[in-house]
Image (tube, rainbow, N blue to C red):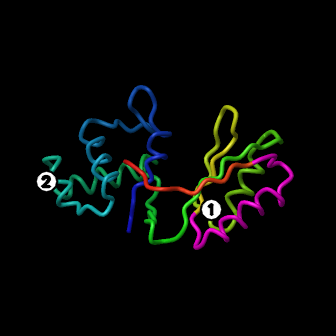
Amino acid sequence: MRWLQLRSVAIALRIDGKASGMDLDHTNLRILSLLEKDARLPTAEIARQVHLSRPAVQERIARMEGAGVITGYRVQIGPAGGVRAMVFVRIAERPCDPALQFLAAQTGVVEVVSLSGELDAVVRVNLIGILLCTKVAMDIMQAQDGVTSHIFQTVGSGVK
């Protein structure tokens, strides 16, 4: 399965609606919206919904990929694929980059997002079995001096 990683899109957008020198017009934003809902949607179906030809849609998607608006595709694991958890982390050292890189390299870590505020990062984890998730959370706490505390939460159902 291929899913659009929209976090990259949100970061790439500036207030004036441009990303990397690319104008994100209404049609491009509609294409992104369709891909967000189903990145496996056939190009012909996207073309039908945005009232363009299939080659025109393919060209727009290619330009958005080239400009860094679309930065990649990923698998989205459902509940049958194991235990999903979020680990909320406080990091003592500044800058946080070494600790964030350490966290990203841990087994089962899907994404590390840096935050501003009371917490410094959120680590999204997908693993098989709650015991392995707990072990990873403990490894994060014990193996890196920069991590001062963490809160481990398993993920229930989500609403999009």
Residue 117 horizontal/vertical position (percent): 67, 31
Residue 87 horizontal/vertical position (percent): 65, 52
Residue 82 horizontal/vertical position (percent): 52, 70
Residue labelled with disc 2: 48
Residues at circles 1 and 2 in contact by the CB criterion of under 8 Å:
no
Image height of 112 relative to 41, above or below: above
Image height of 95 relative to 52, above or below: above
- Please tell me whether residue 5 belongs to the stretch shown in magenta: no
Residue 65 horizontal/vertical position (percent): 40, 53
Q: Is residue 73 left or right of residue 150?
A: left
Q: Secondary structure at mark 2?
A: helix
Q: Secondary structure at mark 1?
A: strand
Image height of 19 relative to 69, above or below: above
Q: Which residues are magenta?
A: 126-149
Res 16 quadrant in image: top left
Q: Is residue 98 left or right of residue 132?
A: right
Which residue is at 75% across, 57% downward?
Answer: 102
Single out the mark in the foreground, 1 or 2.
1
Residue labelled with disc 1: 109
Residue type at the position of mark 1:
Val
Image height of 16 relative to 41, above or below: above
Residue type at the position of mark 2:
Arg
Q: Is residue 151 left or right of residue 42?
A: right
